[in-house]
Image: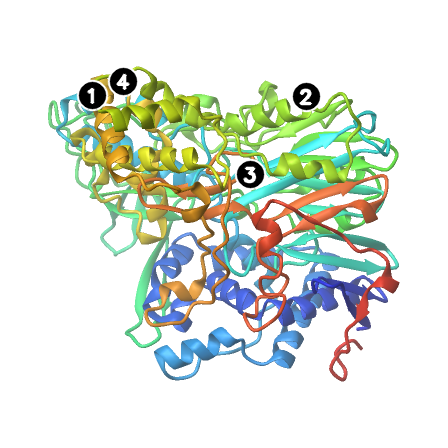
Amino acid sequence: MGFEVFRDALGVPHVRASDELALAHGQGWVTARDRAWQVQTDRWRAEGRLAEHLGDAGVAWDVVAHRLRLPDTAQRAYAALGADDRAWVDAYTAGVNAGLASAGPPAEVAELDRVLGGTTPDDPWPAWAPLGVFLVNHALFSTFPRVLWHDHVARTARESGHAGLAAVDPLDLVRLFDPASDGPTSGSNAWALHGSRTASGAPLLAGDPHRVLELPGVYQQIRLACPEYDVLGLAFPGVPGLPHFGHAGSAAWGITNAAAHAAEVFRERLRRTGGGAWEALGPDGWEPVEHASARVRVRGGEPLTVDVLETGRGPVVVRGMPADADGAPAGERRDGPGQDAGPAPDLRAGAGQDDVTTGAVPRATVEEARSVRMQTRVDADLGFASLRPLLRARTARDVAAALAGWVDPVNRVVAADADGTVLTFDAGRVADRPREERLLPLHAWEAAHAPRPWRTLAAPRVVTDAAVDANEWPSAPDRDHGSVYAPDRAVRLRALLADRRDRALGPGDMAEIHADTHWAGAGRLLRHVAGVDGLTPAAGAVRDRLLAWDLHMDADSPEAALLADLRAVLVGRLVAEPAIAALAAPHRAGPAFDAWFGVRGRVGAALAALLDRTDLGIDGPAHVRAALEEVAAAATPGDHWGARHTVLPAHVLADVPGAAVPAVPALPLAGDQDTVRCTGTVPGVTDRAFRGSVARWVWDLGDRARSRWGVPFGTSGDPRSPHFADQHATWAVARTVEVVTDWDALTPEPLPAGAGE
């Protein structure tokens, strides 16, 4: 297959080929060469084979992958592809295999062999691997881990024995401990300007996705050109095409997460039958459960077997929960016609209360569990049929038509074209549930909770001025697909764009917006500081400095550092409160979900609201007074936010004891969790940024060459490469670089013999 590779000064690959299949092969080849370690580890995740290569460090993920049936889902979706899409994916996979074979083992593999001994297994990518890589990059990006947290809050509150917790409406508790702010993994900004607002008279799109700051980076800058199209944008390494952000010359697109309640969690009752099989309680009685086992090999250890169950709702992800003794009316049986009920349910009078996932529940099983209904598994479809039409899009409406087949994650899309059309719309599949059914697990045995058809999404809306999408509560009810939204960034973005209404904007003007550090959440927290009296002079001075502060989390701001100190002390004090300490009870979802159940992180996000909760026994003024005194006593002259707010990238080797982990410079950062310039921390745990803008992009529809982009680290995943982290300094100050579109300004890359043929 004929392809060529060119590079710009930052090492960004521009792949040009004789036809679409040759281009897919070339994209796979160059991705394997640039991101060998990354695509291999994601492939191992997709197969549930991480522990086979990493040892104990991979076990937690492999268990979840098999319980969720991710390998099987990816294989089913691959088998369901149309012939042309399958040929395109196959060409990409062949390119990956050729690139890996020609590049040799990545440096990280040598490090694994040094630490763990032996030789890291190596085998070619299976045909379905690109779908698996895409799936694992989004499996926990869904809202279902959030619902598991909600479920945990409701159950532990009821079982805690704490009078204050037990007296609060469980839905109030759920909202309290999952406020309108970004979760552990997701978030994003995007905005669109109609040509009437721009210097060129053509539309302008910009934004930045927020995810965990993985090293190498989540996105890959790349250009893909063949006779059918010439598109540049941000790819997922290991996945063909440009599914999220792209500029095709006459059309461009970008996305944010719609915060949709897409994957549904069901509360299941399970029991074993006499023959060792499993059954689940459904709306019509006991139903058979699909039962399989998966063998997980562990490097340097003994293999383990994962019990895999799948009900009529979906794979069981949480097991071993004690069945509540919720009573049904005396004598009631929930067995379907002709089914053997087995032993009668325990219907003891007054045996417990409902766990607030609604309604009285018959006790007819020995085990309670949680299953997950994922769109991708229900339809054996990952939305890959959208990827090729997206590359061919010539207008904004072409983009919308291409994404009509999108599945997951559910996204908000901004699209524009050179003719001046700007559109905003949603893409993906989401169950048609009322808002009250999106917070907690549904009852598998209730007909009213049975799986619903997918919602019909609203038609694209035409933008005539400006549009902002930042995971906020949508103003249009037909775009409300979720339960928890993040309002602050959207409000701030609209204000920033409104402040610039008196001048026409160009790509360079987007830097000020990308870099904005105003944090509205600080104002909500400082409301509690304003009324505190009886302080020592030193603590009073801290209070006065904070109240005079402009709420900008700038790297050189000493007040931002004081605010972070105050926040951390308050988190430490509040997690010791009995009402909150109860939530640290074991969650049973397994270590792969620990980030969603971290009480310190949840308290940090809910801090301002918790300080008002006298009904939970919390004396907010006393905590704030003590925290101000502690901060004043420990204050260091000259301290500023950027001195401790540096990037904390996630690298797979960090979980392998004794392994040397590649590093990047510890540059000072501005911003925080829910500022436009997102550099999220875990208050009370670390002031370093573990999540944030994993790319920044600006698409100019007047001239693609004026477009801009940037990533946190570099184009290469090889720590020995000069392009491993050469964009980090630019990213750290929230800047971007111009894209290069002139082929004559690029450097041809010599290819190994036979590579481009």
Q: Is residue 416 left or right of residue 170?
A: right
Report the Cα–Cα distance between label 3 and label 2.
18 Å
Give the amino acid type for the residue marked by disc 2 in the picture.
Answer: Ala
Marks 4 and 2: which is nearer the front? Answer: 4
Helix, strand or loop under label 2:
helix
**Placement of 347 over or under 223, stated as above or below:** above
Q: Is residue 567 left or right of residue 451?
A: left
Q: Earlier in the sequence, mark 4 or mark 1?
A: 4
Give the amino acid type for the residue marked by disc 3 in the picture.
Answer: Arg
Please state, as top left, top right, bottom left or bottom right, where the N terminus lies in the image.
bottom right
Give the amino acid type for the residue marked by disc 4 in the picture.
Answer: Val
The residue that appears at 78% across and 22% down in the rendered structure is 464
Q: Earlier in the sequence, mark 4 or mark 3?
A: 4
- Measured as percent of width and height from the top left, residue 47 is found at 48, 64
- Measured as percent of width and height from the top left, residue 488 is found at 51, 26
Q: Nearer the viewer, residue 582 or 80?
A: 582
Report the Cα–Cα distance between label 4 and label 2.
35 Å
Q: Quadrant of residue 49?
A: bottom left
Report the Cα–Cα distance between label 4 and label 3.
31 Å
Q: Residues within 10 Å of mark 2 (few under 14, many from 20)?
A: few
Read off the residue under disc 2: 498
Tell whether label 2 touches label 3 (CB within 8 Å). Answer: no
Read off the residue under disc 3: 677
